[in-house]
Amino acid sequence: MWKTTINYNGLSEFEGVLRNTTAELHNPTESRSLSPVINQFRSPLVATLLFAFATASPGCGHSTQPATKPSAQKKTTAATLPPVPESREADDIARFLAGMPGKPGSPFTDLEQTEAWASHRAGLDAGWNRLDGTMVAGLQDFAKTQLSDPALRQAIVYYPFSGPDALYATACFPQNSTYVLVALEPSGTLPSLKQLSRKQDLAEYLAATRETMGSVLGRSFFITREMDRQFRGQVTDGLLLPILEVLVRRHNTVLGFRYTRLDDEGRLIERDRSYKPRTPYGDKGVQIEYRSDEDQSLHMMYYLTINLDDEHLRTNPQFVKYAARLKGAVTLLKATSYMTHRDEFSMIRDLILDNSQAVLQDDSGIPYHFFNPGTWKVQLYGEYTRPYGSFRYLIQSDLQKAYQNPDARPLPFRIGYGYGKVNSNLQLARRIEPMAEQRQAAN
């Protein structure tokens, strides 16, 4: 973590705010409180001073330890990430591929005049308008009425088995400053304008890109076999592009990004493009900084490529350490193929239960019986009879019984498996006693 160990006794109150901002600018998982700090000082001059002070402050690169324990500091010093490099390139590319007009100065102005792009925009506008009026509107209302507790909105949003589903995370928790998505698919790279301009058939390429959004626009989740067919070099080489497209469609401006990986201590560090991962699935990732167009708040989104089954986690202590430091996170689980119902996913299940302050999931998440009533209070939403489709055999009789309780609340929108065909369910499990430590330090 990036916190200075110098004694700042005698600093003014403003300098004290700067000192705290220094730590949170450089620590991805503590950036959750950065936006309120910046919002407190709206003056552009003051905001500039905040960032300048944070960048130049001595002591950056040291973990947080009392100044009276220098030996402990030396032992726990860890690699960390500096501020994300500012660049509009990712925003320009994301807007073009998402079917949104570029901002002034966009290098895609000429390509936006083509018939291929006009058709691309029309198709995506129709799909997003339809989704915004149904599931997204329902999630936004749900978030306002059921997820408004400050403890939830100040937490890291942790989303294992996410694929590129930045939509669900940001719709449920639009105000949170930090999101961590983890899935099996590669993180991918950002193509250049030159690479996109060289596409021999722009209409065909844009149609394929449009198809990568088909699952989330038509079903509310990404289908694994389609991701295997689309995000491993066939349309894109990973999930960076679809994540960026979702973010700009959700009324955000991408400020910059970087390639990341985990070091031996399970902390995120910058990754060189030539880096070869330790395992076939690796621990490559991306870090994206973006700003809300609606309220100008700042946010960080991380994606990591990790195989989450026990066999692979046993040989990946780096990620286990990383996940264990997500103490106090709000965990999302949706359309997981019921992975955590299986014994071979017990490690990620235990990590979630041990470190989350809350879990928001559908019935494909952690089985109901794991939420000990002495530890968790579970609020039920929607309807549950049995899983949909090929998962019908994974019936949870105790969850069926729980849904007979009149305390179950309605869920006036559909989401997850069976989207548009059967009624949906969500469960919000919250830890009864506050966690002894809710310090989130995944960097």
Image (cartoon, helix red, strand yellow):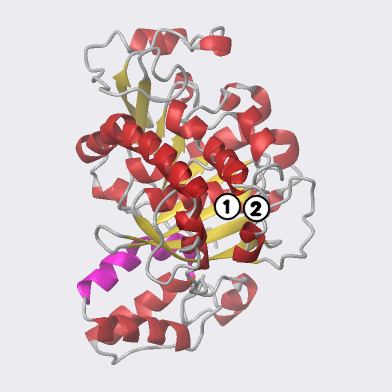
Q: Residue at horizontal 67%, vertical 58%?
A: 198
**Quarter of the figure that contains the C terminus:** bottom right
Residue under the image location 57 percent in, 52 percent down: 240
Q: Residue furthest bottom?
A: 10
What is the C-alpha distance between the residues marked 1 and 2?
A: 5 Å
Kindly identify which residue carries mark 1: 240
Q: Please give the range of residues in magenta.
A: 27-41
Question: How far across and how far down the image is residue 186, in percent?
Answer: 67, 47
**Is disc 2 placed on a helix, strand or loop?**
loop
| Residue at x 56%, y 33% (from the top left corner) | 349
Could you say which quadrant of the image residue 127 lies in? top left
Q: Residues within 10 Å of mark 2 (few under 14, many from 20)?
A: many
- Counting from the top left corner in percent of width and height, residue 57 is at 45, 87
Q: 21 or 248: nearer the eye? A: 248
In magenta stretch: residue 270: no
The correct choice, above or below, for 43 with respect to 202 in the image is: below
Look at the image and tell me whether residue 161 can be seen: no
- State the residue position of label 2: 188
Q: Amino acid at mark 1?
A: Leu
Amino acid carrying mark 2 in the image: Gly
What is the crowding at mark 1: few (fewer than 14 residues within 10 Å), some, or many (at least 20)? many
Question: Is mark 1 in CB contact (under 8 Å) with mark 2?
Answer: yes
- Work out whether mark 1 precedes mark 2 in sequence or the reverse, and give the earlier one: 2
Question: Is residue 36 part of the magenta span, yes or no?
Answer: yes
**Residue 224 placement (x, y as % from top left):** 62, 30
Q: Is residue 141 above or below residue 31?
A: above
Q: Is residue 143 visible?
A: yes
101, above or below 12, in the image: above
Taking 184 as reference, is 357 left or right?
left
Q: Which mark is residue 206?
A: none
| Callout 1: SS | helix
Work out whether residue 14 or residue 279 is closer to the camera in this orientation and state it.
Answer: 279
